[in-house]
Image: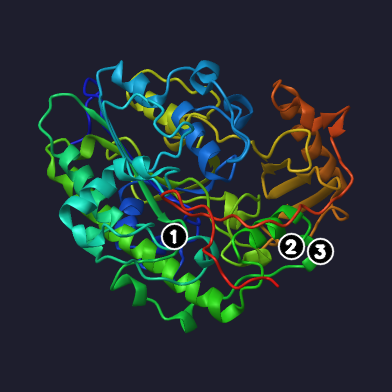
Amino acid sequence: MPPSSSSPPNILFVMTDQQRFDTIAALGHAHVRTPNLDRLVRRGAALTNAYTTCPVCVPARYSIMTGCEPSKTSWLSNWAPGDRVSERCGPYLATTLAARGYRTWGLGKFHTEPRHEPLGFQTHEYSEELWPTESEFLGDDYVKWLRARAPAFAHLEQVHGERSDMYYVPQMRPMPADLTVEAWLTGRAIEEITRPDARPYFGFVSFVTPHPPIAPPIPYNRMFNPDDMPAPVLGDPAIDRADDYLAWMNHAVWAEDIPVPQARQLRARYFGSIAFIDDCIGRIIDAVEARPDGDNTLICFYSDHGDHMGDHRAWQKESFFEAACRVPFLVSWPGRIPANTRHAGLAALTDLFGLATSASGQPELRDGHDLLGMLGAAKPARETLIGMFGTPGTRQFKCMVRSGDWKYLGLANGGRELLFNLRDDPAESRDFAAAAPATLVALRAEAVRVLSAREFTRPAVEGAALKALPFEPFPRVRIKQFARGVTDFGQGPSAS
């Protein structure tokens, strides 16, 4: 039965961490198995040109919760903390919907700073990647559940897989599937979905995976044959290495020299992790559809950013290559959003706030675009999309402009610029700057206009151009991602 205008829908956000856009089988990616994400594709619309406007965890999540771009939240990386986010942007999404009569619950990874920042959820339970202290680790809701249910696993320092030098080494989860964080999160989501309550709910379900370490449980660890996996896509070395920050990131996580056979093994485990999440999502969809108001439920599935997975000689994220900044984005609401449709209009995680508030009956778009209007053909898609990363005015800063078939990248370090045509060269292996100079100038001007408009990003602009700094390689350091008070490796052989 189509939803009535007098009955606000349930709203369910399901997100993953570090899942590439090309990981849903129904959208033409035969190397993965995602029958339940395929169900969501059939249930509604797939936004095939969706982006995160800052391709790293914390900034992306604040954009989701606020509907504001990083230029307003003040978060442009995980390393340069922003401040006063809700003061800058207004009440968070859960707070906004709770004030409209919604029962709000949030489960999983939030990655805010501070970690326990109130986000407005009436029920708020955590499963984070890392906690800085032993007491915080023991207070993690998943860790408490695991230790109570299976004390034999209480010895684990890292419950999601080993990090540091093992970050991009194929692994297997140390516990069986039914004791993983995915299983805990799925069970809790089903409990909240099936809880008797006359109010509509806003649920936020946030998976830690497939974020590294890439460690699916049995049998998902052996679901895919590495020999069948696509090899990393490499472009012109001058293009792949134009952003030295990617080489810095590779070194930081011990991924500077991963051979192709290991890259294929990692992809096999990565797709296994996604297959496991897909099974979990299937159980969540079943719970939604079992309710009498199942059709009056807006479901959004997306990821905070992607992962290079060896493409462009890079690992991790924090770039504006498609593998890192383009995300899967599915939206469904039977009776309101046409089923089994594809929409190529530009979309962003920033749009989720406006989507939810519009569905609840009182649109509040903030920096976002009207997705509900776009999907219903009442509003046009946005013409351009701007992305940014790093502290403005420093060598770390870079930005992207997407418009039509074109993508412009501006790198402060060395003042380097790249221009891609995603229709003619979807692999981003060629620089079209010399072939289309007018397009380069126009997109650069758009970046300058947007960055100049807000005080926080104005230092990235110098006159009528992007601020360029003399090129310097970023100092190579390792990120020692330990947990529970461990800060370094143990005593090894003496250097002498």
Label 3: which secondary element: helix
Task: Give the vertical position of 101 relative to 284 (above or below).
Answer: above
Q: Residues within 10 Å of mark 2 (few under 14, many from 20)?
A: many
Q: Residue at x 78, y 32 (%)?
A: 460
Contact, mark 2 vs mark 3 (Cβ under 8 Å): yes
The residue that disc 2 covers is 240
Query: Which residue: 52% across, 20% down?
Result: 89
Whole-percent x, y for residue 42 in the image: 32, 53
Which residue position is annotated with label 3? 238
- SS label for mark 1: helix
Dot 1, how many residues are within 10 Å of its Cα: few (below 14), some (14-19), or many (20+)?
some
Cα gap from disc 2 to disc 3, whole angstroms = 6 Å
* Residue type, numbered disc 3: Ala
**Label number found at residue 480:** none
Q: Residue at x 55, y 25 (%)?
A: 367
Q: Nearer the viewer, residue 127 or 85?
A: 127
Marks counted in the figure total 3
Q: Provide residue 107's location: percent of width, then percent of height.
A: 30, 40
Q: Are marks 1 and 3 in contact (CB under 8 Å)?
A: no
Q: Nearer the viewer, residue 152 or 241?
A: 152
Specify which label sits upstream in the sequence, 1 or 3: 1
- Compared across the picture, whether 244 is left or right of 28 comes to right
Q: CA distance from mark 1 to mark 3?
A: 31 Å
Q: Which mark is residue 27?
A: 1
In the image, which is nearer the foreground, mark 1 or mark 3?
Answer: 3
Q: Position of residue 193 (x, y in %)?
A: 18, 39
